[in-house]
Amino acid sequence: MNPRQPPSAGNGDEPVETHEENAARPARRHWLNPQRLVVYPAALLACYVLGPLVFLIRSWLHPAADHGPLAQDYLAFWSGSYLALHGHAIDAYNVPALTAVETTALTRSPGVLPWLYPPTFLLLVYPVALLPYWLSVVLFLAVTSAAFVRMASAIVPGRTAMLVALAFPGTGVVLLAGQNGLLTAVFMGVGLILLRRRPVLAGISFGLLCIKPHLAVLIPLALLCSRSWRALFATAVTALVMLGASIWAFGTDTLMAFVHNMGLIANYVDTGQSKLDRIPTFFSMLRLWHVPTAVAYGLQIVSACAGAAAVVYAWTRSCSDELRAATLACASLMVSPYLFDYDLTWYGLVIAWFCRHALAAGFRRGEREWLVLLWLAPMAGIFAVPHLHFQFLPLVTAGSLVVLVRRIVFERSRAGVRNVGATEPVAT
């Protein structure tokens, strides 16, 4: 990344509120004050605790009823690991074989939970079945949650930031599903944190996203635009090493099986077997309205191109590190048609990096309200979209990208005004 342009509050077209101005004018303090930043997340965190308790009580009172397991998606991770540990990694891509292991672990049928990941992710979760299923899932989710909170506090230091990250609804969605969204957010966040000071380590962190390559499509573009050659090289080498190690450990058949199963993924989404209200993409938005698949893919391509254009705009010219990071995280969610709501943990990256910038440079009008909306958005796929029959989350992502690009334009225009003022002769 280029050296950060030091932000300053002042002579823009729209008001910018800094900490100093707020201190001087207490009457204009924003409604989202430090007290509410503690109370609101703490209340939501209490709901996270009550939810599993209610589940356990219902399971105890009605043991014969099927309440659906918590963290069910982790069954596929554990079962894939189990098969790999027993020398049958290829069977992770065999739905009947995988389902048999899942049923044994859960002591009843979980339905269809296929393994839809590349062999690189199987390599990463290879040891998790060394532990019993329930112990393994608790440990996996606890470690990834702690890493996410620690990563967020490295971007925005302070206990309040840690509480906000822990209570982030994106975290709750991942814990409920038993998914890897927190892990991918950590890889992305750590890479962005280290990019300036430790580019090779940053590239290694970016490269680990080969476990879900559709989330990492725009990272090489960003590194190329910013001429971060060492990070770009480390990213490519890490991804290739991960791929080579997975082929060496599990054989080339697993890679071929993954390529074959990519068609299965597309079929699940195209035919609506996957819940489209949990897929926050423009493709899903149109398919919910029964728009033809070709048209839906066309709009998704436009979305991906818009995300790529925003990354080029932010990462090619001078821009603060924080706004670049937020733009890349947000734009990465515009690319794939097969995103799921547990991947919206990346909204947390957008919020953290934007807050880091705005706490120094000041907030413009409406930006804090936008951040609150973005913080709450990941739960919409569960509580709002199914009732509205309208997948509005891609519009939230696109709107957020517009906010970020407008902020970059604003900061660059302010920097231009300051530079012109510094070079104009002073009249005597």
Image (cartoon, rainbow, N blue to C red):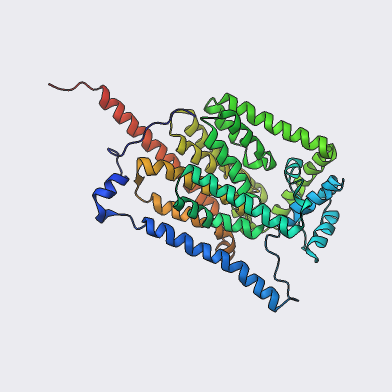
Could you say where residue 366 lies in the image, as x and y percent from the top left? 37, 51
How many numbered callouts? 0
Frontmost residue, 256 versus 146: 146
Could you say where residue 24 lies in the image, as x and y percent from the top left? 24, 48
Left/right placement of residue 109 relative to residue 5 reads right
Please give the name of the residue rendered at 44% of the width and 48% of the height, measured from the top-left corner: 158
Could you say where residue 200 lies in the image, as x and y percent from the top left? 60, 28
Q: Is residue 288 visible?
A: no
Please give the name of the residue rendered at 46% of the width and 55% of the height, measured from the top-left corner: 373
Q: Is residue 182 visible?
A: yes
Quarter of the image holding residue 142?
bottom right
From this viewpoint, which residue is outermost toward the left?
428
Left/right placement of residue 349 relative to residue 80 reads left
Please give the name of the residue rendered at 62% of the width and 58% of the height, measured from the top-left corner: 175
Q: Is residue 277 above or below residue 153?
A: below
Quarter of the image holding residue 250?
top right
Task: Give the position of the C terminus as an image quadrant.
Answer: top left
Frontmost residue, 327 versus 142: 142
Left/right placement of residue 183 relative to residue 384 reads right
From this viewpoint, which residue is outermost toward the bottom?
61
Could you say where residue 222 lies in the image, as x and y percent from the top left? 55, 32
Please give the name of the residue rendered at 62% of the width and 38% of the height, measured from the top-left corner: 216
Q: Is residue 296 above or below residue 53?
A: above
Q: Is residue 328 above or below residue 104?
A: above
